Image (cartoon, helix red, strand yellow):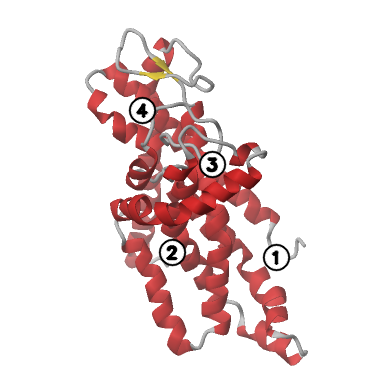
Amino acid sequence: MVRIGDRVFHSVATGSGVFVIALIAAIGLFLLIRAIPSLQANEVSFLFSREWQAGDPDNLRFGIIDLAWITVASSLVALVLAMPTAFGISLFLTQYAPRSLARPFAYVVDLLAAVPSVIYGLWGFLVLTPVISPVAVWLNTNLGWIPLFADGNIPVGTGSNVFVAGIVLAVMILPIITGVTREVFERTPTVQIEGALALGATKWEVVRTTVWPFGRNGFIGGSMLGLGRALGETVALTVILSATQEAPSYSIFDAGATFASKIALGSAEFNNNMTVGAYISAGLVLFVTTFAVNALARWIEGRSGKGKE
């Protein structure tokens, strides 16, 4: 016997899932339809060209290679900085800090997510840049023989580069990664922790043998959520990175535009369908990238599941 309430709940849940899938498909279809005419009229390679001249609908020349570099580089710098920091904070709050300290400290970390993006951008540009510029100069001076730390398209000391943008993004995605990881670590079965302690394990051995294997997938999933947040960030990176229109040199000391900031900065050119289609093409790449990130996260989770060590 199936109750009416169960049928209603089943229908609502199924309809909600179908609606979300249909909505995502509709967005992807819209982007594809609007992008195709401009891609067909494009006179240079969309994937590998470094030009971006979309103002003239009769002479479209736009490529995304530089946009992809700035987007990916700033997001990866943020991820490299945020992941170990979030891991340490999560372990401290769940395994080491007393309850009276862990709860208010967790609230403070979570409040970072409530700060508007423009505030992060202004903080990075006006406050962080003068402080971190000596570090950037040191890296460029001592590690400049590595292409990643070589001279960029703006002077290193100005600070309006991928390096500073990555630090700002790391702060922005920190509450996302920390929140997910903390929740997973807190759900480690108590019987496993007590069993390890009963066998004489130290606190670190408990973390290594019980907490980390149980929460590893959550940490990776939270990191991928943070990466998705970093890839789509607009306002903060527009404030920090829009110091030049010069092509990047593929160094972390480059300035430029990400996919999202390029679309935001180009809104004044949205006066005809072909120009709009060029920017929508960049948006389509960003849209597809989010799916690739999610697929990678699922693959990593599958590879790092319990019992696969």
At label 4, counting other C-alpha atoms closer than 10 Å, the crowd grade (few under 14, some 14-19, many 20 or more) is many
Q: In 3D space, how far apart are the residues under numbered discs 1 and 2 (Cα atoms)?
A: 25 Å
Tell me which residue sits at (66%, 54%) in the image.
Answer: 302
Type of amino acid at the residue the image marks with label 1: Lys
Image mark for residue 306: 1
Type of amino acid at the residue the image marks with label 4: Ile
Residue 305, image x, y percentages: 68, 61
Q: In 3D space, how far apart are the residues under numbered discs 1 and 4 (Cα atoms)?
A: 41 Å
Q: In the rendered image, which residue does mark 3 sit on?
A: 252
Image mark for residue 175: 2
N-terminal-most mark, 1 or 2 = 2
Q: In 3D space, how far apart are the residues under numbered discs 3 and 4 (Cα atoms)?
A: 26 Å
Specify the quadrant of the image occupied by residue 92: bottom right
Q: In the rendered image, which residue does mark 4 sit on?
A: 280
Tell me which residue sits at (30%, 17%) in the image.
Answer: 55
N-terminal-most mark, 4 or 2 = 2
Instruction: From the viewer's perspective, tell me whether residue 13 is left or right of residue 291.
Output: left
